[in-house]
Amino acid sequence: MRLEESLVREPGERPLPREMRVVAPRARGRPREEYRPRVRSTRDVERLRRHRVPAYLLTSEWVSAHGYPVRFRPWLAVPERLAGKVASDYRILPVRDAEALRDPGFVELLTLLLRFDPLAARVVAVRNRSKIDPHELYRRIRNEGLERAATKVRFQELAPALPRVGEPLPREELRWIERNNPPLEEAA
């Protein structure tokens, strides 16, 4: 047996647009309809957010705007408990702390990036060191269970209280990556 959460429309609340929702088959004896949102565009993500569903679309434009020119397919970050309930053309990035997605700041977005590209997260973090609150970075990494990925790219330099889990990459290798990936202004 497993516990599943779902999106349920409250009485009096406007439903998601018709093209965005898939109605799940109603279980016997269940009075409410369960919706599975269909997310295909940035506009759909904005609609979800207006309906108080914590979701965020992490794009390569955000990473490039913070000094690391890179291209990747967007990731749709949704709470872990809703990851299987969203039909999307984007890749899904499950997040443990749903509240962090309601109004994500720089540190939250940095931890999302740490999940799938730790080296890019390192370069963005080092180039934007002044935007990082070490206590908040520590809290976010611990809440998401990303200590191993953080240790790999030596995030302890940014948040000293982080525990070391596993072996970090050599410091010279990280410096080489930082030097050989010029900021956007220099790359143009």
Image (cartoon, rainbow, N blue to C red):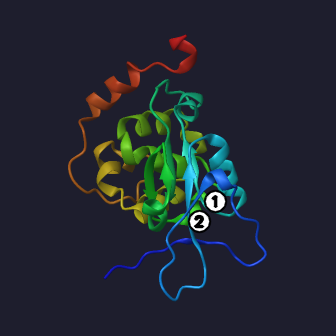
- Give the x, y percent position of residue 141: 43, 58
Which residue sits at x=31%, y=82%? Answer: 1
Query: In the picture shown, does residue 153 fall above or below 9?
Result: above
Q: Alpha-carbon neighbours of circle 1 within 10 Å: few (<14), some, or many (≥20)?
A: some
Which residue sits at x=37%, y=43%? Answer: 116
- Which is nearer the eye, 15 or 60? 15
Which residue sits at x=32%, y=49%? Answer: 149
Which residue sits at x=49%, y=71%? Answer: 25
Query: In the picture shown, does residue 28 fall above or below 70?
Result: below
- Which is nearer the eye, 16 or 18? 18
- Which is nearer the eye, 89 or 102? 89
Mark 2–mark 1 CB contact (< 8 Å): yes
Q: Which residue is mark 1?
A: 102
Q: Which residue is mark 2?
A: 99
- Give the x, y percent position of residue 188: 55, 10
Residue 38 makes an appearance in the image = yes
Is 12 placed left or right of 98 in the picture?
A: right
Residue 104 makes an appearance in the image = no
Is 62 placed left or right of 142 in the picture?
A: right
